[in-house]
Image (cartoon, helix red, strand yellow):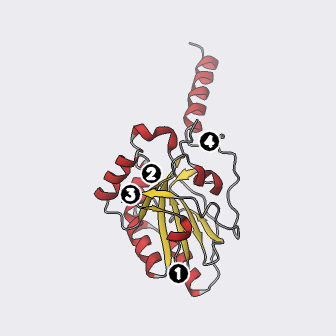
Amino acid sequence: MDINKTAYILSIVLTIGLLAFLPVENNPAERLEIGAKAPLTDVEVTDVSGETLTLAEVAGENGLLVNFSCNTCPWVKAWEDRYNPIAELAEGNGIGVIALNPNAAIRDEGESMEDMKERAESSNYQFYYALDKQAKLAEAFGATRTPDIFLFNSDMELVYTGAIDDNAKSAEDVEKTFLKNAIENLVAGNEIDPKTTKALGCTIKWPE
């Protein structure tokens, strides 16, 4: 095999590999901008407990934290040890917390409600974990990844979106606690900086 042909094949393989980490194009909605109101707050979702609720009902007096998450993504597993501490911080400061599973295309591949119940129990989730059945909420938010964070104030206006912090691999080595800082500054009435960071994770598996 000549060098040019080998290089061509390698370029195709690399391109296919990289595409797996890009946002899926059949998500038509644009990402919510800072200051935008939370959408679809009256749409009912079902929690792993069987309770039916809405984002408006989950929201606390100081706001709402929405995390688009799932069961099968290694990025979720990497950050998962920060889920409960963040939820405790948020709820202790009057901010409601909910994680939503938008992976509609692979419900039979580890993302079903039964799988979610098992994950919530094994990881001892201390917050709502609900099914975004056809990824309608994720679509409306313009979410692209799992995990993908959206923090709203008491007026349900977006004040922070993106990543939990700057080190998925190790909580001990985190240098910038983006979400923790955003929550603390929101409650204190201080400026949130940064307001947006890049969400890193697996692409949402959208329904056909």
Tell me which residue sits at (51%, 48%) in the image. 133
Q: Quadrant of the N terminus?
A: top right
Q: Secondary structure at mark 2?
A: loop
Q: Which mark is residue 70?
A: 2
Q: Secondary structure at mark 3?
A: loop
Of labels 2 and 4, earlier in sequence is 4
Marks 1,4: beta carbons within 8 A: no
Quarter of the image with the C terminus in it: top right
Residue 178 in sight from this viewpoint: no
Mark 3 or mark 4, earlier in chain: 4
Local crowd size for mark 3, using a 10 Å CA cut-off: few (<14), some (14–19), many (≥20): few
Indicate the amino acid at tag 2: Cys
Verify CB contact (< 8 Å) between mark 2 and mark 3: no
Q: Which residue is mark 1?
A: 184
Placement of 172 over or under 134, stated as above or below: below
Which residue position is annotated with label 4? 24
Mark identifier at residue 50: 3
Q: Quadrant of residue 21?
A: top right
Horizontal and vertical percent position of residue 132: 51, 52
Residue at the left extreme of this rendering: 122
User: First in sequence: mark 1 or mark 4?
Assistant: 4
Classed neighbour count for the residue bearing mark 1: other residues with Cα under 10 Å, few (<14), some (14–19), many (≥20): some
Residue 135, horizontal then vertical, whole percent: 56, 48
SS at mark 1?
A: helix
Three-letter code, disc 1: Glu
